[in-house]
């Protein structure tokens, strides 16, 4: 296969001074993209700032013949990062929202500051940076956006209530942006990485830490922001040279009463609970309209059947 390249494209990678973001920036820079290497340069809990991280990555890209510029703004002021792209390169095509911090505490000990800072960097940062790029993407009818979630968000993880909530919030943001971006050729997808970095050095066992190089995930994200990538609204989990799509599924469900005139009671809910939670025929619902149409169909079916004689046990068993 011909090498997939990014010549003529401008990419912004947030939090690109370390870990995963650094690998994304190096890879895109080596494939012809002009890269804005954003990094505030703080500690992993968000404290402090410095130019060193971003400058070092820019140097590495330039040393290999690539084109890059450093940006030291916080993602909370995402419009400044996008301005750096426009001022230096005149356009933006790719945005990888990667910057992140951790302020892990067991739930009872989470302070307002722990909550607000984590939400500021992950949620507000992704919102501000993406919104600043959005009008440009719409006008040029082209954009590739990646949000960064986490298995802590999809599945929960002890001591990460603030982080989990913000990380799952990003999936919701991506879901809606994928819909709003559809007619403008803006693809919005989510990466769920697991990699060795300063965020995971005291979480992953040493042997796993050694094996989980972030450069194994960079090509997955690289493909997800390439012009040939058609997917949107996808959640892609990747680690150790492995990648898999993940999504929410919805069970068939169950009616909680036999006919429209029956009440729904706590007892009728209990009686039907096994069917409510039976995932045997669970389906991936791709669009909110499918849920609505499904409900309207079931309601109509229920009303039609209620007018007929016969065994009502089988009526409207799912919805
Ligand atoms: P890292 O700590 O090595 O890199 C994150 C970078 O973001 C740092 O260089 C930091 O200075 C920068 N940053 C922090 N706040 C910023 C702000 N306000 N503005 C601009 N830059 C800022 O972490 P890592 O592991 O590479 O994480 C990258 C992303 O992947 C994060 O969003 C993280 O939550 C996510 N993630 C990482 C996992 C892993 O296994 N490493 C697992 C799941 C998600």
Image (spheres, helix red, strand yellow):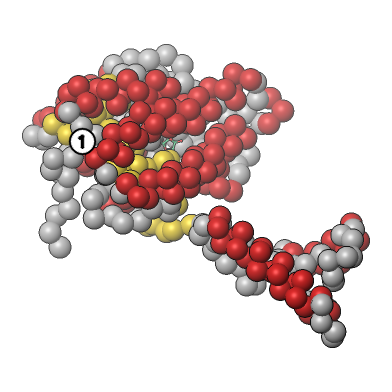
Give the position of the C terminus as an image quadrant: bottom right
Give the position of the N terminus as an image quadrant: bottom left
Q: Is residue 250 above or below residue 318?
A: above
- Left or right of 226 in this view: 64: left
- Left or right of 86 in this view: 121: right
Q: Is residue 307 above or below residue 74?
A: below
Give the image quadrant in which the ligand numbered 1 is located. top left
Pointer 1 residue Cβ closer than 8 Å to ligand 1: no
Can residue 307 be seen here? yes
Pick the front one: 258 or 28 = 258
Q: What residue is at 42 percent from the left and 59 percent from the top?
A: 244
Q: Residue furthest bottom?
A: 310
Q: How packed is label 1: few (under 14 Cα within 10 Å), some, or many (20 or more)?
A: many
Could you say where residue 14 lies in the image, as x and y percent from the top left? 34, 30
Q: Is residue 99 above or below residue 23?
A: above
Could you say where residue 204 lies in the image, as x and y percent from the top left? 48, 42
Q: Quadrant of residue 159?
A: top right
- Left or right of 188 in this view: 288: right
Q: What residue is at 82 percent from the left and 77 percent from the top?
A: 307
Q: What residue is at 52 percent from the left and 57 percent from the top?
A: 287
- Left or right of 99 in this view: 314: right
Name the secondary structure under disc 1: strand
Could you say where residue 291 lies in the image, as x and y percent from the top left? 60, 60
> Which residue is denoted by mark 1 in the rendering?
10
Pick the front one: 212 or 294 = 294
Can residue 216 be seen here? no
Could you say where residue 228 lies in the image, as x and y percent from the top left? 24, 55
């Amino acid at each position: 296969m011909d090498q997939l390249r990014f010549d003529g494209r401008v990419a912004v990678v947030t939090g690109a001074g370390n870990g995963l973001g650094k690998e994304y920036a190096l890879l895109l820079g080596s494939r012809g993209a002009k890269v804005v290497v954003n990094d505030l340069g703080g500690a992993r809990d968000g404290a402090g700032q410095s130019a060193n991280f971003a400058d070092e990555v820019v140097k590495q890209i330039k040393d290999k013949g690539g084109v890059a510029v450093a940006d030291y703004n916080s993602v909370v002021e995402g419009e400044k990062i996008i301005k750096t792209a426009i001022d230096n390169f005149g356009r933006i095509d790719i945005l990888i929202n990667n910057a992140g911090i951790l302020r892990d505490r067991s739930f009872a000990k989470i302070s307002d500051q722990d909550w607000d800072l984590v939400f500021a960097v992950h949620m507000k940062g992704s919102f501000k940076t993406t919104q600043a790029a959005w009008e440009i993407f719409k006008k040029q009818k082209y954009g590739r956006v990646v949000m960064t979630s986490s298995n802590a968000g999809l599945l929960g993880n002890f001591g990460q209530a603030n982080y989990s909530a913000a990380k799952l919030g990003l999936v919701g943001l991506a879901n809606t942006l994928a819909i709003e971006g559809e007619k403008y050729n803006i693809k919005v997808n989510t990466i769920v990485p697991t990699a060795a970095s300063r965020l995971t050095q005291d979480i992953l066992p040493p042997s796993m830490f050694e094996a989980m190089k972030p450069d194994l995930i960079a090509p997955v994200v690289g493909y997800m922001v390439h012009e040939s990538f058609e997917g949107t609204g996808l959640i892609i989990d990747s680690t150790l040279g492995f990648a898999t799509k993940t999504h929410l599924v919805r069970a068939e469900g169950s009616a909680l009463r036999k006919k429209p005139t029956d009440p729904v009671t706590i007892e009728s809910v209990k009686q039907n609970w096994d069917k409510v939670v039976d995932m045997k025929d669970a389906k991936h619902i791709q669009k909110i309209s499918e849920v609505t149409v499904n409900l309207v169909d079931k309601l109509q079916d229920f009303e039609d059947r209620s007018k007929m004689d016969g065994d009502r046990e089988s009526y409207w068993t799912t919805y």
